[in-house]
Amino acid sequence: MLISALKNNVYGYWRTRTGVTAEAQLKSVESRYHSSGRGGGSSSTEVSYDYEVGGQRFTGSHVTLFKTTGRYYSPLKRAMDTHQPVRIFIDPNDPRFAVIDREFAWFPLVIALPFSLAWIAAGLFLGWCLLLNFQGKTTPVQNDRTSRAPTSPLNIIPPAC
């Protein structure tokens, strides 16, 4: 899951790498609180904005690629209330993709990548162990009486019949 989210963020960063921008008008800005169940939580900002590229109108909702969105609520709400346009970054090849802040942040990458690699390594190790275990290696059954451990409490081997 982390790899998928990280992949989408890095891909979004790549799509907007040319720095092509457009002006957008905010339609809605909402703050959402997400409880963690342990007395804490976090907030996020959900937006909707309209913009025009090449005579076509689009609607976007991406705030940022890498950062948490809670800190964007106040400035975006102020811009919406005063009818100020916001600058968005777009993918020039597919203008349906737009984001308000495309600034790269190393923090998610530094956290997600080592944990993801550790889980992959653990999975490969467990798979290797299971493969070795199920390759049909069995211990041979020995039938002659001389190789058996004594079964009597006095350590006397019973005579062969």
Image (cartoon, rainbow, N blue to C red):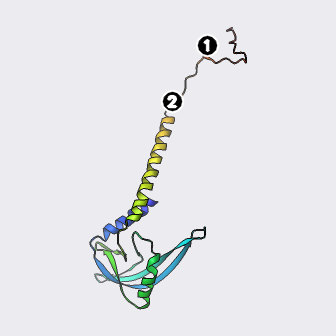
Which quarter of the figure is the C terminus placed in? top right
Give yes or no for contact between labels 1 and 2 (Cβ–Cβ under 8 Å). Answer: no
Q: Nearer the viewer, mark 1 or mark 2?
A: 1
- State left or right for residue 100 relative to residue 144: left
Q: Secondary structure at mark 1?
A: helix
Q: Identify which residue, 66 or 23, lies in the foreground.
A: 66
* 41 sits to left or right of 9: right
Q: Quadrant of residue 18?
A: bottom left
Mark 1: which amino acid? Thr
Picture layout, residue 119 above or below residue 14: above
Looking at the rendered structure, which numbered label has been put on residue 146?
1
**Of 98 and 73, the residue lying toward us:** 73
Helix or strand or loop: what does disc 2 sit on? loop
Label 1, residues with CA under 10 Å away: few <14, some 14-19, many ≥20: few
List the single residue furthest toward the left: 18
The answer to whether any part of residue 77 appears in the image is: yes
Q: Position of residue 53 (x, y in %)?
A: 30, 81
Above or below for 31 versus 107: below
Q: Does residue 86 sit above or below 34 in this rendering?
A: below
Is residue 3 among the parts visible in the rendering? no
Q: Which mark is residue 137?
A: 2
Q: Residue lying farthest right? A: 153
Q: Position of residue 90 (x, y in %)?
A: 32, 75
Q: Residue furthest bottom?
A: 82
At 61% across and 13% down in the image, what residue appears?
146
In the rendered structure, the answer to whether residue 107 lies left or right of residue 33 reads left
| Residue 14 in picture, x, y percent from top left | 31, 67
Q: Residues within 10 Å of mark 2 (few under 14, many from 20)?
A: few
